[in-house]
Image: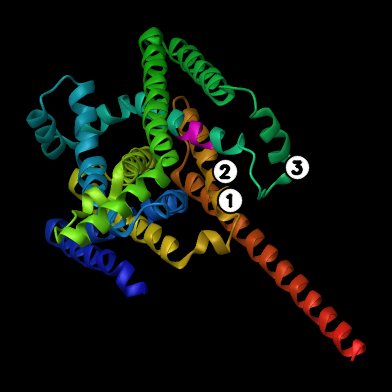
Amino acid sequence: MVLKTFGWSFAVTALGLVAAILFGGWTAFGIVAILSILEISLSFDNAVVNAGILKKMNAFWQKIFLTIGILIAVFGMRLVFPVVIVAVSAQLGPIEAVDLALSDKDRYQELVTDAHPAIAAFGGMFLLMIFLDFIFEDRDIKWLGWLERPLAKLGRVDMLSVCIALIILLVSAMTFATHAHQHGGAHVDKAETVLLSGIAGLITYMIVGGLSGYFEDKLEEEEEREHEAEEEAERTGKPKSAVALAGKAAFFMFLYLEVLDASFSFDGVIGAFAITNDIVLMALGLGIGAMYVRSLTVYLVRQGTLDDYVYLEHGAHYAIGALAVILLVTIQYEINEIITGLIGVVLIGASFWSSVRRNRALAAAEGKAGSDEKTEVSSGV
């Protein structure tokens, strides 16, 4: 099971590390290995949240997530995205941006750093909305009941999460403007950039999340139609394509997953510059890490881990909330990637341990109930 799920990840790791040695020797090998570990530690919460969405999708779309999805994740977000940032911020053509990334690495890193406020605002707002929508929803299973019960009651107020997110964005933009002004910077431009990027992140969340939610509501209807289509195909002898069987719901959930993964990858891409400004090594290291996150997502789904450890999803969403806040804080202050990674690992670890304790308590209660029943039967005899 492990080899079947993680086989491609192992293969990509081997190829990536060999490519690193060929490209820059053992130093490059070490950098790529460190970047891989960084990406996995920063994105473990991503895998847990992804698994919650992926388990609603059929086997075909799970394969698409692991194949086409990984191409988007590795080449799109870890290789193309940093180049696009540079091209837009420096008003260069794509070929010039690639040339800059390969020939003038220091200037390339400088341009990506300049674009950081926009990236942090966009990703921070997208992730913040995921967190707020989660904690304001009334759930049957609660991890931190003392906190989640009152928040669930507050969540009955329409559009509360959007209002809170916009207030936080406004505070972030104003804080950054003050900071830039104190250093003689063009505070209006940067504040506007933060504000516009944050609103773009909010709009992206609402569009993609809204579409996936709309089609998720229609999932039962889709499944019924697909079942009828399958029966029709069997009667007529005509094969039904896998894409049609997957349905619109799965497509929009896949789209939502890709945007979610993109938002999670922002901190990894930015954090990678603390280790190297070589775009090739960055793509290799983060690509290997992204592959493991994908495989881990599928593993969690197939093993039913989220059903067995019910608080894992809560821990992952709290980690998302922490990451969103960290991204917004990094508009003004620098935060070490180790802290970012550790917060996520600690929150997920705590939720896992709480789940284990819950399972033990339930098993003990069932065992006690069973022994009491046996005692009653034996005394009755």
Residue 146 tag number: 3
State the residue lying farthest toward the front: 235
State the residue lying farthest toward the right: 379
| Amino acid type, callout 2 | Tyr
Q: Is residue 350 above or below residue 266?
A: below
Q: Position of residue 293 (x, y in %)?
A: 36, 56
Marks 3 and 1, the one that precedes in the sequence? 3
Of 378 and 71, nearer the camera is: 378
The residue segment tinted magenta is: 127-131
Q: Which residue is mark 1?
A: 347
Circles 3, 2 touching at the beta carbon (< 8 Å): no
45 with respect to 102 (left or right): right
Query: Within the magenta stretch, is there residue 323?
Result: no
Q: Position of residue 176 (x, y in %)?
A: 47, 17
Of 80 and 365, nearer the camera is: 365
Circles 3, 1 touching at the beta carbon (< 8 Å): no
Image point (70%, 70%), residue name? 360
